[in-house]
Amino acid sequence: MNLAEMCSTSTSYIGQIEIGNRFPSLELIEKIALALEIEPHLLFYNELDVKKIQKPQPVRKNKLSDSVKNELIKNLTDAIKKVVKQTN
């Protein structure tokens, strides 16, 4: 199962967020965070800060691998930062 399926959205929409062309709604940010098993505010941290934060690991049937999860977190945080910079 991929992130888009876990968030009930399309892979193209997730891709648009990752490259900074779209900004997710608060609802989608919550879904992404849930799928990645992190708190939503962590999507706005830089990747070094995220690595320092310890989080419980709930058991999930369709869990993303750690490497995929880390890459998605990095791409999404970079995209969100890009959009935030464009609006300032």
Image: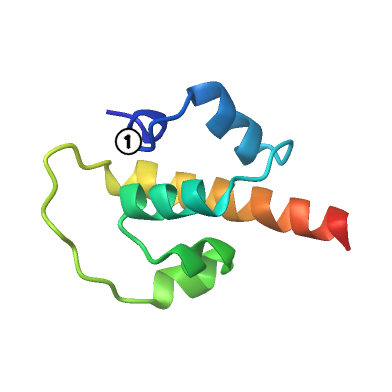
Disc 1 crowd rating (10 Å Cα; few below 14, some 14-19, many 20+) is some
Q: Report the amino acid beneath label 1.
A: Met
- In the image, 50 versus 81, the foreground residue is 81
Residue drawn at point x = 82 percent, y = 59 percent: 85
Taking 82 as reference, is 21 above or below it?
above
- x%, y% of residue 20? 71, 41
Taking 64 as reference, is 85 above or below it?
below
Q: Is residue 19 left or right of residue 39?
A: right
- In the image, 55 versus 66, the foreground residue is 55
- x%, y% of residue 15? 58, 30
Q: Quadrant of residue 39?
A: bottom left
- In the image, 17 versus 28, the foreground residue is 28
Disc 1: which residue: 6
Q: Is residue 22 left or right of residue 12?
A: right
User: From the image, which quarter does the N terminus lie in?
Assistant: top left
Q: Is residue 15 left or right of residue 73?
A: right
User: From the image, which quarter does the C terminus lie in?
Assistant: bottom right
- x%, y% of residue 71? 46, 46
Taking 86 as reference, is 45 above or below it?
below
Query: Label 1's element?
Result: helix
